Image: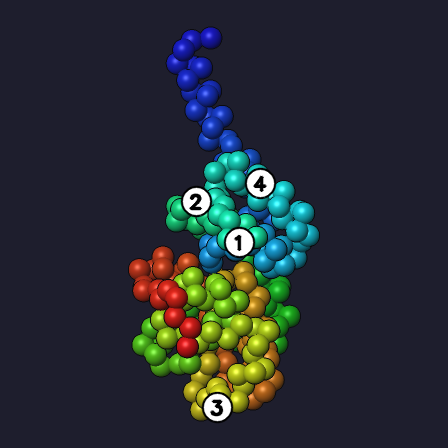
């Protein structure tokens, strides 16, 4: 075998390490979660609804491919992405799938059709209203994800604590809930609950990563 062919084979084998590492729905979901901020394996397992042992196995595959890194915080091991480019890579996979796989749109449309409290809202118009502060914005992700990065002015209202905030929310202003992006269901659940309580509420498809991709600012660390 010629040296040039050996070189090309070796390089493409390394490229394949990345694609093999992400060839799993759960590992892609774990990358999506880590795009929101660093997490322990226990937290990741809870959010992905898998066992800690299963999450650990998936994370080890991602670590071997050098897509994630670890750091010990006391008795806990915290996982984070190896860099922003890993999140960009995940976003590219998602965009490519959206553009080429009609099944994604079909699955999403079917899910949203079964959510009677959701209404169609123009994405650009809603984004502008959020940007200018014309609405009350709720970040319904877990608090640690909010602290890792959130839309400026958004209130930290994790979905499991929403009931505690109802009395403090305005009844005369539209409320916009967002979470991890278009395929996250936390904002769907929040809007359903808010509308059931008489609030004027809508879901924003954008999450922090989509917001950042538009060149819009993201706030880190504050928690009103």
Instruction: Name the residue that disc number 1 marks.
Output: 74
Q: Which residue is mark 3?
A: 171
Find residue 10 and report its horizontal and vertical position in percent.
Answer: 46, 21
In the rendered image, the vertical position of residue 115 relative to residue 52, given as above or below:
below
Point out residue 212 in the picture as x, y percentages from the top left corner. Answer: 36, 60
- Label 1 – label 4 distance at C-alpha: 20 Å
Mark 2 vs mark 3, CA separation in Å:
43 Å
Q: Helix or strand or loop: what does disc 4 sit on?
A: helix
Q: Is residue 105 left or right of residue 149?
A: right
Task: Calculate the distance from the C-alpha at mark 1 to the C-alpha at mark 3.
Answer: 44 Å
Q: Position of residue 113 (x, y in %)?
A: 61, 69
Q: Quadrant of residue 132?
A: bottom left
Q: How many residues crowd around disc 4 within 10 Å: few (fewer than 14), some, or many (20 or more)?
A: some
Dot 1, crowdedness within 10 Å: few (<14), some or many (≥20)?
A: few
Residue situated in front as seen by the camera: 53 or 115:
53
* Lower position in the chain sequence, tag 1 or tag 4: 4
- Residue situated furthest top in the rendering: 1
- Closer to the N terminus: mark 1 or mark 3? 1
- For mark 2, does the 10 Å Cα neighbourhood hold few (<14), some (14 to 19), or many (20 or more) residues? some
Residue 139, label in figure: none
In the picture, measured across the screen, residue 6 lies left or right of residue 152, that is right
In the rendered structure, which disc, 2 or 1, sits on the residue that comes first in sequence?
Answer: 1
User: Answer yes or no: do the residues labelled 1 and 3 have beta carbons within 8 Å?
Assistant: no
- Which label number is shown at residue 60? 4
> Residue at label 2?
82
Badge 2 or badge 3: first in the primary sequence: 2
Mark toward the start of the polypeptide (4 vs 3): 4
Visible residue check, residue 99: no
Q: Is residue 43 above or below residue 219?
A: above
């Amino acid at each position: 075998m010629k040296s040039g062919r050996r070189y090309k084979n070796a390089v493409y084998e390394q490229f394949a390490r990345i694609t093999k590492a992400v060839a799993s729905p759960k590992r892609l979901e774990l990358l999506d979660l880590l795009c929101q901020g660093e997490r322990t394996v226990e937290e990741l397992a809870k959010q992905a609804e898998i066992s800690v042992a299963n999450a650990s196995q998936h994370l080890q595959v991602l670590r071997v491919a050098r897509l994630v890194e670890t750091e010990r915080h006391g008795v806990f091991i915290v996982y984070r992405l190896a860099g922003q480019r890993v999140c960009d890579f995940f976003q590219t996979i998602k965009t490519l799938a959206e553009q080429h796989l009609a099944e994604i749109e079909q699955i999403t449309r079917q899910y949203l059709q079964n959510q009677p409290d959701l209404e169609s809202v123009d994405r650009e118009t809603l984004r502008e209203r959020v940007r200018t502060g014309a609405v009350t914005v709720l970040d319904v992700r877990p608090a640690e994800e909010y602290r890792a990065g959130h839309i400026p002015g958004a209130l930290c209202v994790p979905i499991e604590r929403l009931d505690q905030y109802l009395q403090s929310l305005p009844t005369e202003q539209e409320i916009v809930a967002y979470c991890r992006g278009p395929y996250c269901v936390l904002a769907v659940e929040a809007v359903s609950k808010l509308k059931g309580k008489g609030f004027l509420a809508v879901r924003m498809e954008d999450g922090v990563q989509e917001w950042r991709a538009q060149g819009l600012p993201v706030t880190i660390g504050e928690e009103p």
